[in-house]
Amino acid sequence: MGSGNPFDNFLSSAVPFFIFIVLAIVVMIFITSLVKGIGQYFRNKRLQERHIHAKLIAKRVQNRGGHGSTDDHTGYYATFETEKGERLEFNVGGQFYSMNTEGDAGMLTYRGTRFMGFEREQL
């Protein structure tokens, strides 16, 4: 009727606690990201749509995931420079990314942090 190994007693009580803590941290990170995303959506929605002359000065691609059984995700980004020298970077779609080149100038339409469109000037 011994109490057994003290290390076994520690593991049986500590491991579930640590698993709970890790799970709680993951859930909190998910909730925080969700709340930030919803907040940004409503901030953008309140802002007025802007149309300004800008030049596409840089494009980049960011790949995430794709390890093992996870799906990969490719993000396309475009950086514009306004006539006042302000630089704005937006997440853009793959079609926009492939159809436009650095150096293109035209009318940029955006609302807050949301890219709405870009109409190139005809040369």
Image (cartoon, rainbow, N blue to C red):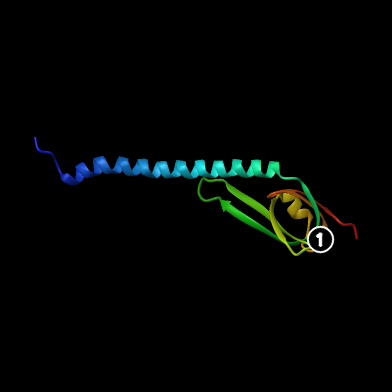
Where 1 sits versus 75, above or below? above
Query: Between 90 and 77, which is closer to the camera in this rendering?
Result: 90
Q: Residue furthest left?
A: 1
Query: Between 85 and 71, which is closer to the camera in this rendering?
Result: 85
Residue type of the residue flagged with mark 1 = Asp
User: At 40% from the left edge and 41% from the top edge, which residue is drawn?
Assistant: 23
Residue 16 in picture, x, y percent from top left: 31, 40
User: At 50% from the left edge and 41% from the top edge, which residue is drawn?
Assistant: 31
Residue 94 in picture, x, y percent from top left: 71, 50
| Quadrant of the rendering where the C terminus is positioned | bottom right
User: At 37% from the left edge and 43% from the top edge, which residue is drawn?
Assistant: 21
Question: Which corner quadrant of the image does residue 40 belong to?
Answer: top right
Q: Residue furthest top?
A: 1
Query: Between 67 and 5, which is closer to the camera in this rendering?
Result: 5
Horizontal relation, residue 73 to residue 56: left or right: left
Q: Secondary structure at mark 1?
A: loop
Question: Which corner quadrant of the image does residue 121 belong to?
Answer: bottom right
Where 59 sits versus 95, above or below? below
Where 58 sits versus 107, above or below? below
Mark 1 sits on what residue?
Answer: 104
Query: Between 67 and 12, which is closer to the camera in this rendering?
Result: 12
**Other residues around mark 1 within 10 Å, as few (<14) / some (14–19) / many (≥20):** some
Horizontal relation, residue 123 to residue 74: left or right: right
Question: Which corner quadrant of the image does residue 86 belong to?
Answer: bottom right
